Each structure stands twice: as structure tokens, then as C-alpha cells.
Image (tube, rainbow, N blue to C red):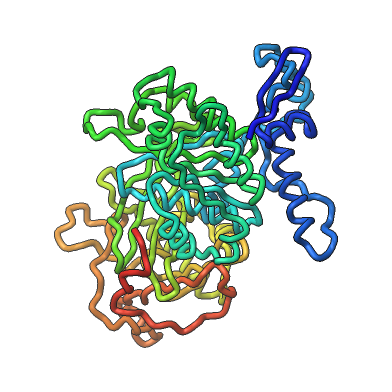
Amino acid sequence: MRLDALTSAGQFAYSAFGYIAATRHNGDRSACARAARYEQQAELSPTPLPPQPAPRVTITAEPAPQPDQSSWQPVDLGRILSGEHKPTAPDLLERADGQMLLYAGKINSLFGESGSGKTWVALLACAQAIWAGHGAVFVDLEDSPASVAERMMLLGVTRDELRTRFAYIRPSDPSAHGSTDELAHVETAIAAVGATVVVIDSLGEAMSLDAVKPNEDDAVAYWHLRVARRLAALGPAIILLDHIVKNRDAPELFAIGSQRKRAAIDGHAMRVDVLEPFSRDKGGKLKLTSAKDRHGTFSRGQVVGEMTFHTSPNGLDVNLVAPVGRDENGAVFRPTALMERISRWLEDHHGAWSQNEIERAVSGKGSAKRSALQVLTDEGYVTQEQAQRGHQYRSATPYREALDTPETGDPTGTASHRVPPRPTASRDAVPTPENDRVPRVPAPRIAGTRDAVVGQEQPQTQPDRVPRDEVIF
């Protein structure tokens, strides 16, 4: 439905949402979305709600022009020059160390080969938004409602959270045709669930629906302006999923199609690659590489995160962590001295500790300590537990640098970059004072759900094989 507004400059056509934003909120679509969400909650709540809270995410999108104001008029820089403006920083898709990777109110991108895990990364961003008390919208042109809902539940999102804070849209019509503005439905969904994340999976299919060819510069640029930037103006982070060129000689940090796709990114574009192929039995691992960061938080070509998947009887344990250091051959860098230092500290200090607490207590360079803790966790010497915010760590089995020997035939004679061959001792073997040099085998790491109570270990069994219908890759 569209409404007409008569102004001094002429007659303008609006969607119902756009009309309310223009007439009640001075053109601020973000404020209109927040107000609509608050009014809906107030109607459904049996008791009066407190005053509308300020959003957790900093909205950086510029206000929409007024109907009688040209977008070509000079922009008032008074607020920016007064010192009130804060530099733009990423505020969504959080790593275990607290670093954010995506920008709210901006167009972000995840691209990679088919099956590289792009959708999993986007769904994790949706899940984190929901756990933070907000919502997410998923515009799906490639999958199905059942598949997306199942993946979200595997991540730990509850059915009630999906009902109230997640909007799934499966379009089969162009976003605009004739006088019909289909994007108004997406705007309404953003307001209804209080979305801080909007995913479009995938960009190629969405443009194809609007008869836009991916190599036509003008059409691609206009599509981003008309669709992606319009939705970003409401405040959420827009995540466009895209594919890469199949030609091996093509640039590695470019998505397929027109360069206007890259130019339209005013947030963070990341390439997604598989480090360990996905398996229903043992999960997998992928990495995120920065291709473009408009605001300079990350440099081009920088690996900004590694995402690990572990299957368990409880579902799927997914962790997004800081990248582990690797040498030029891709082998994991092993800071063995720091690994032993952290292991000994955790052995002496019982209980679960946050990464920041460990880094403050153990001497050494911060980045190297983070790498050491990650290697200890990956190899089972340290267990990782979901906390109210982030993760906490506790000692599982002592690590000793003296036992971390290089593989036979290693010409370097050092253990720094080598993973020792797995010992053949029992998985239940625990080093004792009488035999402290017995090689240990880390017990399988069974991570709990995001609602697990910190400090309480729950005895669980490890099945020989995860049922085929439990995990979708």
C-alpha cells in the first residue's frame, strides 16, 4: 500500500511505514521502527512497560531527506564538528574476545565459494542479536524456512525466541513492481522484531529477482541504493551474502560481478573460506578474511576470525574466535612456553576464568597469549564454557612444553610450529605426581548450550555418530 503526501515541492508517494516516519518522526525511519516495536510490546504486555530504552547499537545512518528537501542540499556538519560525533566502530558479530566485526546501519558483505559457511556466519550474527534482546530478519532466496529454523535452533536459539524475535521472508516477486512497494514488508518486519541484523541470502538471487544483471554497473549501483541502503537507513546491519568468481586468476578478495558491489559496501566485507571441511561427525572450521573495511578497523587481507563447529548430543557448538597464528605453510603457530605458563596458572587457580582475567594474570604479549589459549582449547588441555557474556576457561589436563616434541624427521628440530602425534594412551588417563610425564590424550570437548550454568559440569556421553538429521551443513 502506498500513500500520497502533498508538499510545497509537489506530490510524493510513500509506503505506510515511510509515511508514518515522515509525518511523525521527522523522516527518521530508525526512530519510527523503535517506536512501533515499543507500541506493539505495550499492547501485548499485561503490565505497563518502563519508558522506551535506548538501543544498544549505535545507529550511524544519516537521516532520510525531508519530502521538501533535496538530497543535493549541503549537509549540516554542526553535530560532527561539535565533538559529539563518535568514530564509527563495529558493533555486531562478536568474537569470543569481545571484538565486533560488523557495522550497524551499514551495508556489510560475506562472500565465498558455495558451501564455505557464509550462511552459518550470518545466522550466528542473527542469534547473537536475539540473545542481546533484539531481533533479526532473514530474507532467503536460496534455502527453506525449515532449514533456516533448524540451523537457528542448533545454534541455541529457542522456539519462543524464533517466534517473537526472528522474521523469515521468502520472496518470489520483485522488490518493487508497478505501484507496489514490497520492501515495505521488510521494513515492517524490522520494526516488529526490533531487528539489528538483516540478512539477504543471496545478493545474486535478490538482484536477479529485480531483473538486475550482476555485471551492469549502473543497475547494480541503483539496486544497492534502492534496497540495501534504504534498509540500512533504519539502523540494522545489512549482511549481503555473495559468491566469488570461479576463475582462479580472478582477485581473491572480490565477489563475483560488478565492482559496484564492492563500492557499495560502507561497512565490512569479509571472505569466508573452509579450513577444515564440514562433517556430520566432527564439525569443521572456517576463517574470515577482511576484504574491505570502510572505517579502517581491519586491514585488507587480515584474517579477522576463525569459526569452529563441534557436534555434540546437545546440538551444535559454534565458536567465533580471534584467528590462530599460522606460518607460511598454514601450520598452526604454537607458543609452547606461553601455553605451559597459562596451563600452570589455570591448574593453580581452580574454577573458570575469563580470557581477560587470564591475560592479566599471565605475563607475555597479549596476541601471543590469545593464540596460546586458543591452541590449548582446540587441543583439549583447557575447556571452554559459555558464560553470561563471552566464554570462561578452566584446566582440563596439564600441558608441559617438554612433552611437546616435534614429529620424527622434522628438519627444524623445534616444536614451535608442530602438533605432536596423538599418543595412544587411554582418553581417561590423568597425569599423576608419580608419572607426570605420561603423554596425555585430551578428552573430547563437549560444549554445553549458551544457557549452561558456569562452573557446573554435566556428565554426558559421546555417541559414536551424530544422527544424520541433527546437523545441517
Left or right: 318 in relation to 38:
left
Closest to the observer, 351 or 102:
102
Q: Quadrant of the C terminus?
A: bottom left
Left or right: 15 in relation to 282:
right
Quarter of the image for residue 102 reads: top right
Q: Residue at x 33, y 79 (%)?
A: 463
Quarter of the image for residue 127 reads: bottom right
Closest to the observer, 123 or 187:
187
Position above or below: 273 against 396? above
Q: Quadrant of the N terminus?
A: top right
- Give the x, y percent position of residue 19: 72, 31
Q: Residue at x 70, y 12 (%)?
A: 74
Left or right: 382 in relation to 350:
left
- Give the x, y percent position of residue 470: 37, 69
Q: Residue at x 36, y 25 (%)?
A: 213
Q: Is residue 204 visible?
A: yes
Closest to the observer, 20 or 412:
20
Quarter of the image for residue 317 reads: bottom left
Left or right: 413 in relation to 457:
left
- Give the x, y percent position of residue 454: 58, 73
Q: Is residue 296 visible?
A: no
